[in-house]
Image (cartoon, rainbow, N blue to C red):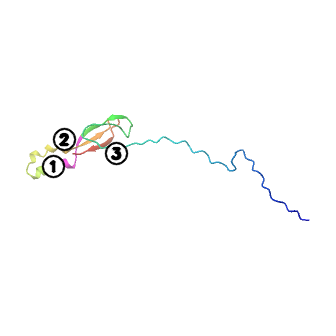
Amino acid sequence: MDVIMEYQPQPLVTSSPYPYPQPPPPPPQQPLMVIITETAFGPETQPMVCPHCYDNISTRVKLEANLKTHKFAVHLCCLGLWCCAPCPYYMNSCMEKKHYCPSCGSYLGSCEN
């Protein structure tokens, strides 16, 4: 005599109310820190936070000769005004204004006329 038995699934024994293991919780979110490094510098000193030393500063402006300054001096020489060739090196409008951090001394940007 053949006995046919029906299959009856056994209940799962778990400590969780869910039948499948749950994924671990996500790690806590770190606060987002945004550092702006592109700043439009003008001819005057400006307040800002230095991106290198994170100090609240007012930039130090230093005048330096650039290609424009040298071109004016060469043009004056070519026109026969060689005695006036040093003048562009003393004119603020022909110089580049470079901004530096007074705390750490790092270069921050420049402004040309």
User: Viewer-proximal residue, 13 or 62?
Assistant: 13
- Amino acid marked by disc 2: Asn
User: Viewer-proximal residue, 6 or 70?
Assistant: 6
Span highlighted in magenta in the image: 63-73
Of marks 2 and 3, which one's residue comes earlier in the chain? 3
Of marks 1 and 3, which one's residue comes earlier in the chain? 3
Q: CA distance from mark 1 to mark 2?
A: 13 Å
Question: Residue 17's image quarter?
Answer: top right
**Which residue position holds label 2?**
92
Q: Nearer the viewer, mark 1 or mark 3?
A: 3
| Residue name at image x 34 percent, y 45 percent | 38
**Which residue position holds label 1?**
72
The secondary element bearing badge 3 is classed as loop
Q: Tell me if label 1 and label 2 are in contact, CB under 8 Å.
A: no
Q: Nearer the viewer, mark 2 or mark 3?
A: 3
| Residue name at image x 14 percent, y 51 percent | 74
Q: In the drawing, what numbered circle is on residue 39?
A: none
Q: In the drawing, what numbered circle is on residue 38?
A: 3
| Residue name at image x 89 percent, y 65 percent | 2
Of marks 1 and 2, which one's residue comes earlier in the chain? 1
